Image (tube, rainbow, N blue to C red):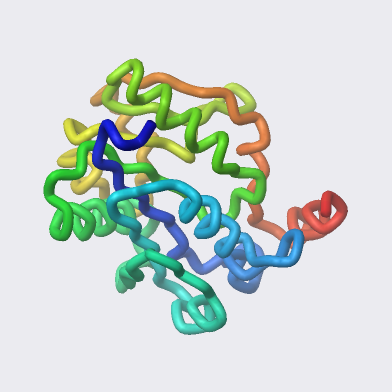
Amino acid sequence: MMGRAKIGVIILAAGASRRLGFPKQLVEFKGKSLLQHSIDVAELLEFDYRILMLGANAKKIEKGLDIGNFTIIINEEWELGMGTSISKGVSAALNVKSDLELILILLSDQPFVTKEKIQELIREQLENKMPATFSEYAGEVGVPAIFSKETFSDLMTLKKDQGAKKLILDEKISFETIKFEEGIFDVDTAEDVELLKQME
C-alpha cells in the first residue's frame, strides 16, 4: 500500500506537560510508555524516514526508550509551542529525504492509535489525493494527520503554538477525514492518567 508513495513520519513529543506535572510521554499504559506505543505502531509500517521530535525533558524521556529506526531531533524552542516542532520536523525530514511525497504527524499521548488506523489514514490520502487527511473525533479534526508535499511549505512556516489545524482555519488547504473516535482521548491531567489506568 505504501510502496506507491514516499512517506515520512514525525512524532511530536517535545512538550513539557505542565498541566500534568511530569512528562506525559512516559505515562505507562499496558506495560509501555505512551511515547513508546506511538513509536512501536509507526515501526510496524514502512515509512521512508522517521523523526522523533523531543524538547522538554529530552534526556529523561530518551532514557530507556527504544527508538528503533527513528532519528531524534531536539527542538530547542519547544517552549514556543507545537508549531515550532512541526516546522522543524518537516524541514529536517526534507533535508534528508527531499523526495518525500507525504508526511504523517503523530502525537506521543494517544494510547489508542493503531497500525490499522494509520493505514486507513494513508489509504484515504492515497486514494483521494487531497492536500491533507485528518482524523476526526467528537466533531473536530486533528491528528494523526497526513500531509501532501504541496502543504510542506505551509507546515514549515507554522509559528509558535500553531498546530497543523491552523492551515484549515486559514482555509489554506482542503482535506479529507477518517473517523477515529478514540483519538479524542489524550493525556493532559492527572485525571486523564487515572482514567487511562482504569482502561488497562
Residue sitting at the far right? 198
Residue at screen point 78% across, 54% down? 196
Q: Position of residue 153 (x, y in %)?
A: 15, 41
Q: Position of residue 14 (x, y in %)?
A: 43, 65
Residue 66 vs residue 59, the one in the foreground: 66
Residue at screen point 41% across, 31% down? 122
Residue at screen point 46% across, 30% down? 121
Q: How many numbered marks appear?
A: 0
Left or right of 19 on screen, residue 93: left
Q: Position of residue 107 (x, y in %)?
A: 50, 51
Position of 60 relative to 10 (above/below): below
Position of 19 relative to 99 (above/below): below
Residue 186 vs residue 81, the one in the foreground: 186
Which image quarter is the N terminus in? Answer: top left
Which image quarter is the C terminus in? Answer: bottom right
Residue 65 vs residue 110, the one in the foreground: 65
Residue 32 vs residue 145, the one in the foreground: 32
Residue sitting at the far top? 128
Residue at screen point 27% across, 50% down? 159
Q: Position of residue 163 (x, y in %)?
A: 38, 44
Left or right of 69 on screen, residue 63: right
Left or right of 140 on screen, residue 54: left
